[in-house]
Image (cartoon, rainbow, N blue to C red):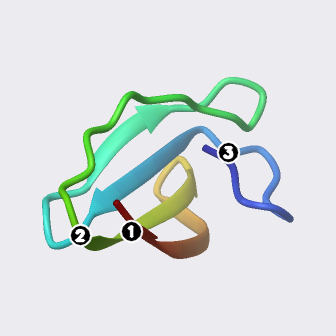
Amino acid sequence: MSISGTAEVTTYGYRIGDAEEILVPAIDNFATAEVVLPAGTTTITVRAFNGDILLGVASTDYTL
């Protein structure tokens, strides 16, 4: 996970559809996580944080 234009990210949060946000620690501003997407179209939202400070938000629709 990464969001362009964000610096010093300590944590990323991602949400698949309406599910609860899952937090993933960042190393050098990047994070990875394995996800399972449901069939059909779903929105994935990623938020970047430095501690408790929100740095940016991005979302994308995926269709399987």
Q: Residue furthest top?
A: 27
Task: Please give the name of the residue rendered at 86% of the width and 65% of the height, measured from the top-left corner.
Answer: 5
Mark 3 vs mark 2: in front? 2
Q: Secondary structure at mark 2?
A: loop
Q: Position of residue 59 (x, y in %)?
A: 51, 75
Q: Secondary structure at mark 1?
A: strand
Q: Residues within 10 Å of mark 1 (few under 14, many from 20)?
A: few
Number of on-image labels: 3
Q: Amino acid at mark 3?
A: Val
Q: Position of residue 58 (x, y in %)?
A: 58, 73
Q: Amino acid at mark 1?
A: Thr
State the CA–CA distance, disc 1 to disc 3. 28 Å
Task: Please give the name of the residue rendered at 20% of the width and 59% of the height, measured from the top-left corner.
Answer: 39
Mark 1 vs mark 3: in front? 1
Q: Residues within 10 Å of mark 2 (few under 14, many from 20)?
A: few
Q: Quadrant of residue 17?
A: bottom left
Label 3 sits on residue: 9
Among the two numbered marks 3 and 2 on one chain, the one whose residue lies closer to the N terminus: 3
Task: Please give the name of the residue rendered at 46% of the width and 56% of the height, measured from the top-left corner.
Answer: 52
Q: Position of residue 3 (x, y in %)?
A: 71, 59
Numbered tag placed on residue 40 in the rendering: 2
Q: Are marks 3 and 2 in contact (CB under 8 Å)?
A: no
| 29 relative to 51 in the view: left or right | right
| 11 relative to 62 in the view: left or right | right
Q: Amino acid at mark 2?
A: Gly
Nearer the observer, 49 or 24: 24
Numbered tag placed on residue 5 in the rendering: none
Label 1 sits on residue: 63
